[in-house]
Image (cartoon, helix red, strand yellow):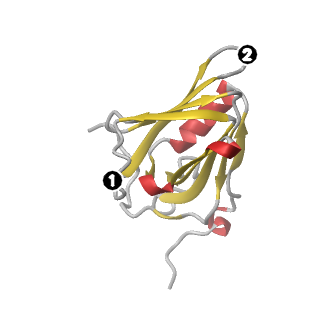
Amino acid sequence: MNNDATFEDGREAPLNLGAFDPEDLQVISSLLQDAIFPITEMTWRSGQRCFALLLNRFRWEDPGRGRHAPERVQSLLVIDNVLGVASQGIDRQDREMILSLLAVTFEPGEEGAGHVLLTLAGDGAIRLEIEALEVTLKDVTRPYIAPSGKIPDHNL
């Protein structure tokens, strides 16, 4: 017996969103709050000017949480036009590290350039220098029951 939820259960389609301005990025950021990912699922392809994360995001948009357990889904976050990547508070040598994403924000620069900031729990951050804002978020698996069985709570 398979206990995983299906798209058909909620009659919902997987997310496939793009952000080309700060307002669009706020929507993606709200959907990514409390997403978790192993440090090994983060990659920067400098030649392609692309930074990507495969993460397990909490399905904040799920209207069926009252009918079933909280769900997560694996999603791909891709930031294009990346010129450079810097991080703080992350031990990139610790291949077992699990990171938790709190927010994705844009710090504008000149002529559409700027920085995308990925704020992590525990004072970590990833800062991407970009030529132009182009971010995509795409669900790549079916939803599954959140292993904790709980909704993330910030009232600790």
User: Residue 78: x percent and y percent?
Assistant: 64, 45
Residue 131 in view = yes
Dots 2, 1 in contact, CB < 8 A = no
Badge 2 crowding class, 10 Å Cα cut-off, few under 14, some 14 to 19, many 20 or more, is few
Along the viewing direction, whichever of 17 and 145 lies nearer the viewer: 17
Task: Give the residue displayed 46% in from the left and 58% down from the top.
Answer: 70
Q: Secondary structure at mark 1?
A: loop
Of all residues shown, which one is farthest toward the left? 156
- SS of the residue under disc 2: loop
Alpha-carbon span between mark 2 and mark 1? 37 Å
153 is higher (above) or lower (below) than 98: above
In the picture provided, is 127 more to the left or to the right than 123? Answer: right
* Front one among 69 and 30: 30
> Residue 146: where, in percent of width, then height?
44, 61
Amino acid beneath label 2: Glu
| Location of residue 72 in the rendering, given as x and y in whole percent from the top left corner | 50, 58
Q: Which residue is denoted by mark 2 in the rendering?
A: 111
Q: Residues within 10 Å of mark 1 (few under 14, many from 20)?
A: few
- In this view, the residue farthest toward the top is 110
What is the three-letter code of the residue carrying label 1? Asp
- Residue 71: x %, y % from top left: 50, 59
Which residue lies under the disc numbered 1? 94
